[in-house]
C-alpha cells in the first residue's frame, strides 16, 4: 500500500515535469515564431535565449536568496533538506554519485517489489519499535 502510493507520487511528479518541459519548449517556439518576421531568425534565436536566461536568473535569485531574519532572532538550525542541498552545492561530484546510486536502487526496487516491500516493512517496524 505504501509502496503503491509512493510509486503513484513518483509518476505524478514525472508527469508534471514532462508537462512543464513541453510547455516551456512550446513557449520558446512560439516566441521564436513571433519574432522571426520582425528581426530575422538569428536575432530571434538570441532573443529566446535571452528570455530563457532572464527567467533562469530571476528563479535562481529567488531560490538562492538568503532569508532575512529580524534583529534579535537567531536563524533556525538547517534541516536535512537544506544540508543535502548544501552538500550538493559544495561537492557536485558526490551529489552526482549519490543520485546515480539512488537511481540504481530505484531500478532494483522496481524490478523486485517483494524485496522492496520487505525492506520498507522492516524500516517501519523498527521505527515503531523505537517509539
Image: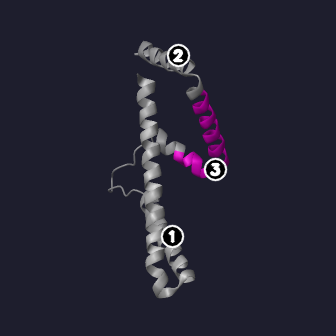
Seen as rendered, the residue at the extreme top is 129
Seen as rendered, the residue at the extreme bottom is 38
- Name the mark nearer the viewer: 1 or 3: 1
Residue at 37% across, 58% down? 68
Task: Check the image and report above or below for 111 versus 41.
Answer: above
Residue at 45% across, 62% down? 24
**Nearer-N-terminus badge (1/3):** 1
User: Is residue 61 in view?
Assistant: no
User: Is residue 17 in view?
Assistant: yes
- The residue under label 1 is 53
Q: Are marks 1 and 3 in contact (CB under 8 Å)?
A: no
Quadrant for the C terminus in the image:
top left
Task: Check the image and report above or below for 50 versus 110.
Answer: below
Q: Which mark is residue 25?
A: none
Mark 2 secondary-structure assignment: helix
Mark 1 secondary-structure assignment: helix
- The residue under label 2 is 118
**Nearer-N-terminus badge (3/2):** 3
Task: Check the image and report above or below for 43 versus 13.
Answer: below
10 Å neighbourhood of mark 1: few (<14), some, or many (≥20)? few
- The residue under label 3 is 92
Quadrant for the N terminus in the image:
top left
In which image quadrant can residue 114 be found? top right
The answer to whether residue 102 is magenta is yes
10 Å neighbourhood of mark 3: few (<14), some, or many (≥20)? few
Q: Which residues are magenta?
A: 85-108
Amino acid at each position: 500500500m505504501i509502496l503503491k502510493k509512493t510509486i503513484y507520487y513518483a509518476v505524478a511528479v514525472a508527469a508534471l515535469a514532462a508537462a512543464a518541459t513541453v510547455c516551456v519548449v512550446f513557449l520558446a517556439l512560439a516566441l521564436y515564431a513571433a519574432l522571426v518576421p520582425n528581426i530575422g531568425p538569428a536575432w530571434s534565436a538570441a532573443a529566446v535565449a535571452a528570455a530563457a536566461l532572464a527567467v533562469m536568473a530571476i528563479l535562481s535569485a529567488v531560490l538562492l536568496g538568503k532569508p532575512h531574519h529580524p534583529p534579535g532572532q537567531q536563524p533556525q538550525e538547517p534541516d536535512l533538506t537544506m544540508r543535502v542541498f548544501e552538500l550538493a552545492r559544495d561537492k557536485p561530484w558526490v551529489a552526482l554519485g549519490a543520485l546515480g546510486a539512488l537511481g540504481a536502487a530505484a531500478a532494483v526496487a522496481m524490478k523486485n517489489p517483494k524485496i522492496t516491500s520487505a525492506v520498507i516493512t522492516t524500516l517501519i517496524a523498527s521505527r515503531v519499535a523505537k517509539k
